[in-house]
Image (cartoon, grey):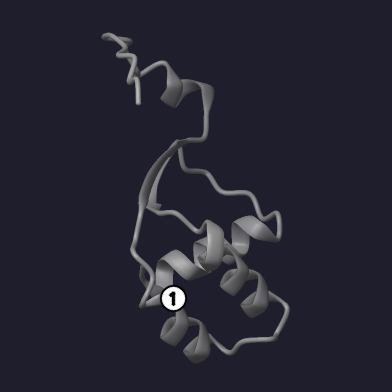
Amino acid sequence: MTEEWLDFIVSSRIGMPHSYDIVIGSMANDQVYNYVSDYINGVLTREQFWVLAKYKHPTHQINFCTEQSLRCLTYIKSEEIIK
């Protein structure tokens, strides 16, 4: 997670459009999502957000934002995982 990442997440959460076809980066889910919300609502400062968020295990996602980006995908196969 970077300063640019936080700015992008905040912009997305408040509904600002972007022109990216594909976005790759850390997921803002679970507890980090709550921290982002608290930052947006003024409950946390930017500095407080980073102190809390840096201790969370980062996860990554690939977000296909346009139909054009989805056409780049090719299905190969699937696997069933049984627990």
Q: Secondary structure at mark 1?
A: helix
Specify whether 20 is left or right of 37: left
Query: Is 73 situated above or below 17?
Result: above
Q: Residue at x 52, y 29 (%)?
A: 66
Q: Position of residue 64 (x, y in %)?
A: 46, 33
Towards the viewer: 21 or 47: 47
Q: Which residue is mark 1?
A: 53
Amino acid under disc 1: Ala
Q: Quadrant of the C terminus?
A: top left
Which residue is at the far left?
76
As rendered, which of 15 and 55 lies closer to the eye?
55
Q: Residue at x 34, y 14 (%)?
A: 80
Residue that extends furthest to the front in the rendered view of this protein: 83
* Quadrant where the image shows the N terminus: bottom left
Q: Is residue 67 above or below residue 42?
A: above
Residue 37 is left or right of residue 3, and the answer is right
The quadrant where residue 40 appears? bottom right
Q: Which residue is pictured at 44% across the width and 54% down the height? A: 27
